[in-house]
Amino acid sequence: MTADRPDQLFAGPRPVHSQDDPKPFGSLSGTLSGPLSAKLSGKGLSLPKLPRGKAKPPPPPPPARPPSSSRPPPSKPPKRPAPPKRPAPRGNGGGWLRGLVHWGLVAAIWCGVGLGAVLAWFALDLPDISKVAQFERRASVTVLAADGTEFARFGDLHGTTLGVSDLPPHLVNAVLAIEDRRFYSHFGIDPIGLMRAVYVNWRTGRAVQGGSTITQQLAKNLFLTAEKSLKRKIQEAMLALWLEHRFTKDQILTAYLNRVYLGAGTFGVDAASRTYFGKPATQVDLRESAVLAALLKAPSRYAPTSNPDESAVRARIVMAAMVDAGFITTQQLEAARDAPPAPRRKPGGDGRYFADWVTDLVSGFVGPEHGDVIVRTTLDLKMQRAAEQRLEALLSGPGAAANVRQGALVAMSPDGAVRALVGGRDYDGSEYNRATQAMRQPGSAFKPFVYLAGLEAGWAPDSLIEDAPLQIGDWSPGNYDGKFRGNITLATALAHSSNTATVRLTDRIGTDRIRRVAAGLGIAAPLTKDLSLALGTSEVTLLELVRAYAGIANRGAPVWGYAISEIKNRDGTVLYRRQGGGSAAVVDPVHAVQLSRMMAGVMEFGTGKGARLDRPAAAKSGTTQDYHDAWFVGFTADLVAGVWLGNDNNEAMRKVTGGTLPAKLWQGFMMDAHAGKPPRPLPGLDGAPAWAVPVASADGARPAGPAPAAPAAHAPRADSGIGSLIDKLAGGGSAPKVQYDYGHNSVR
């Protein structure tokens, strides 16, 4: 054996000793002297004892090197470097396989990195999933007619939230059969269904099938938009996987059945069932369940209210899918498919323009944050149907021949309650409301406000005014028929719609007075300050013009055209109720009654003869330059109504004046609206005959009657710049003899 770790003690090679050496450690004591010996002795260094027996003692240590020796210690011979190992020979097959695995792993790692980067990029603008419960929807507005009949609904209508276990099994199975048969077996994405859809779409050359699962559809409905893009589909798949991880299958299906859009503003099967069948979803039968499931493909196209035939065909396809999936038997299919669905249809007239207008007004009464509300309106469904039918008949008949493509009608009671409103020919073709939104020149339909201002200024219905040619700078207003009647009364001038007489009256009383009268009665649009105001060049809406006429019928007291009488929430709590209305007269009631008599003359012997009724009525026609607009507005003791005809692109009609087609339309509607009602005198007239003053003679002699005071005595001349220009041009009051171009600048 060798000593314990002798290499730490000696730098050189270890000498070999034989067994004949009597003192193997004798030389050690003599050699270790001096400080080293003392140091070792001080530390109590002891040598281990040798074991007894035949064990061979360790060889003695080498003798100590003499200190006087200057010879360097013998160096250790260098180790011979081992020869390099030769690599083992490789077989060709093993190397190729290992290379393939290596590069395959590298490619897989990079593909994983790339896929992760792509998913991270798509996840950057994912919606906040934590806000899934904060579903925001439009509050529903149910619109009722004056008699309580529902005729329109807007907003999002939600029914009772029902779980899968609460619904009839055939309703749940109908949805699964037509939408996602493997719903309870896939993980949110259905690879089989996706591949089938790709194959079918490839075979047909167009998109006829979708591969989205119910979970994916719910993800889209909850978080995403209907945008058709690759990004949206990838985000949809990611969210579907999250939904499957977070919720159970029944929870996902419950959310889907209560949130899916099913047409007519309904969300969820319960709201749709109540809308289409008038009962909750818990009570639908097999046929009705198939109708509801059919709506998932295209709610508008397969709505049983608007397309019952297509709805029935699609429902039979759903039931056939239920048989194929094993949910029902062939016998059940045969028993259900032959019975056509009987949906609850929308009653009464359309009234969609009116309903749109009402819906926009609701927030002004109950605030913008209102919930689901039920609005009772002033609409008379009988009048509404009559207005729609009369307008369509005119536009499709004589209107088509006269190049009239649009029209509007407003009817209200003298207190302002709107009874009928038609904003155009076809709501589906154009939602633009020409009764409440279109700003058009009223033409001569504005003249009653001029003559009412004249009465307020001291003129009388039988006061004389000159109907003669007129030149004002470059403007030469003339009469539509090209005739001039000389000195005529105000009543005659209004009945025959004399432009020159009306402009002269406007110059005498000033435009400011006319603007105040018109605004006081309800004309809210800005009005021009020049003399063309007399001929209705300032644009107004039909609704505000009818409202202002109602103020005349109401003896000078303005009214507010209103359509809402009461608003309740779904619990029946009254949120708003109209508490009467009306205001004090803005003009002398006597003058308003005088104007009504003058307007009755329009229908007796003036431009409105074609609109005579079987009862007293007052009205005024209006036509704008080049036949762009034609109006007829008037009233009886029970109803105020106005009609407008024209074209949206301002294209000229074929010589349509207010006294022709608009007068006929107004007459037909008013006859329908007054059917069964006894005639009544106009307000304030108490059965007295209308003011029907005959036309003055050619020599200017006025008819017999009370002598009118001189106009200057009643109405001081306005000292405006235009008024002084009239004086200069007219030479102090005499009408200049000018040639008028009758083909231009005439308003009737």
Image: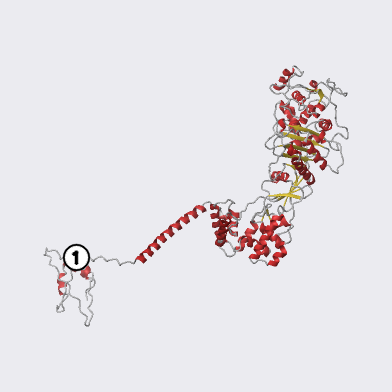
Q: Work out which quarter of the rendered image holds the C terminus and state it.
A: top right
Quadrant in the rendering for residue 79? bottom left
Residue 720 in view, yes or no: no
Residue at image mark 1: 78
Q: Position of residue 191 (x, y in %)?
A: 55, 61
Q: Identify the image quadrant of residue 360.
A: top right
Instruction: Give the side of residue 232 with respect to residue 8, left or right.
Output: right
x and y percentages locating residue 224 in the rendered image = 58, 53
Seen at 78% across and 40% down, the residue is 412
Q: Relative to 686, is 25 above or below?
A: below
Compared to residue 199, the image places residue 64 above or below, namely below
Q: Quadrant of the N terminus?
A: bottom left
Is residue 695 rendered to the left or right of residue 336?
A: right
Question: Picture quarter containing residue 685?
Answer: top right
Closer-to-camera residue (301/273):
301
Please tell me how crowded label 1 is: few (under 14), some (14-19), or many (20+) other residues with Cα within 10 Å: few
Q: Secondary structure at mark 1?
A: loop
> Which residue reaches farthest bottom?
53
Residue type at tag 1:
Pro
Can the viewer see residue 89?
Answer: yes
Residues 657 and 523: in front is 657
Query: In this figure, which colouring scheme has been used for the structure?
Result: secondary structure
Q: Which of 649/284 is in front? A: 649
Q: Position of residue 503 (x, y in %)?
A: 75, 25
Count the numbered circles shown: 1
Q: Find residue 515 and report its horizontal and vertical position in percent.
A: 73, 30
Q: Nearer the viewer, residue 544 or 671?
A: 671
